[in-house]
Amino acid sequence: MAEHQPSAQEHLENAREMLWEAIQTLEEAQRVMFRAGDRYVADVWGDGVRAVLDLTERITDLSGDLTKVHIEIGRLTKRDRGRPGEPAK
């Protein structure tokens, strides 16, 4: 019996699921970074607060970029459904 070769659609859906998990992980990292920032403020480590905010902004930007990719994969998947060569679901 021939081994199942995933379709392009299946690969896209797998990538989209992986991105969703990554986005959720980044959101949790943001929450942890905010708690770190709160501790810096409580401990009066002024320079650390700025660094934590900068890193949190970078996480936010990354999360936004991944969200855009996730949406685009969804659009591509929806557009390509039913095209010749791809099994309809």
Image (cartoon, helix red, strand yellow):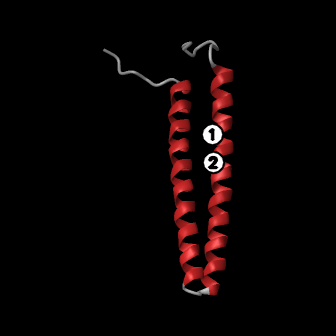
At numbered mark 1, what does the secondary structure look like: helix, strand or loop?
helix
Q: Position of residue 18 (x, y in %)?
A: 50, 41
Q: CA distance from mark 1 to mark 2?
A: 6 Å
Three-letter amino acid code of the residue under disc 2: Leu
- The C terminus appears in which quarter of the rendering? top right
Mark 1 crowd level (few <14, some 14–19, many ≥20, 10 Å Cα): many
Q: Residue furthest front?
A: 42
Residue 67 position by quadrant: top right
User: Which is more toward the observer, 5 or 32?
Assistant: 32
Disc 1 target residue:
70
- Please, is residue 6 above or below residue 61 in the view? above
Residue 39 in percent (x, y) is at: 53, 77
Q: Quadrant of residue 38?
A: bottom right
Q: Residue at x 68, y 57 (%)?
A: 61
Q: Is residue 73 left or right of residue 14?
A: right
Q: Badge 2: how crowded within 10 Å, few (<14), some, or many (20+)?
A: some
Relative vertical location of residue 87 with respect to residue 75 in this rendering, above or below: above
Quarter of the view holding residue 54? bottom right
Residue at the spot of label 2: 66
Where's residue 15, x and y in %?
Answer: 53, 37
Query: Which residue is located at x 54 percent, y 13 percent?
Result: 87
The tag on residue 8 is none
Q: Looking at the rendering, in which quadrant would you find the N terminus?
A: top left
Residue toward you, 5 or 71: 71
The residue positioned 58% from the left and 67% from the top of the image is 34
Q: Are marks 1 and 2 in contact (CB under 8 Å)?
A: yes
Q: Is residue 23 left or right of residue 76?
A: left
Given the image, on which type of amino acid does mark 1 rest?
Answer: His
Q: Position of residue 75 (x, y in %)?
A: 68, 29
Kindly identify the residue that appears in the image at 63 percent across and 79 percent down.
Answer: 49
Look at the picture and state if 26 lies above or below 88.
below
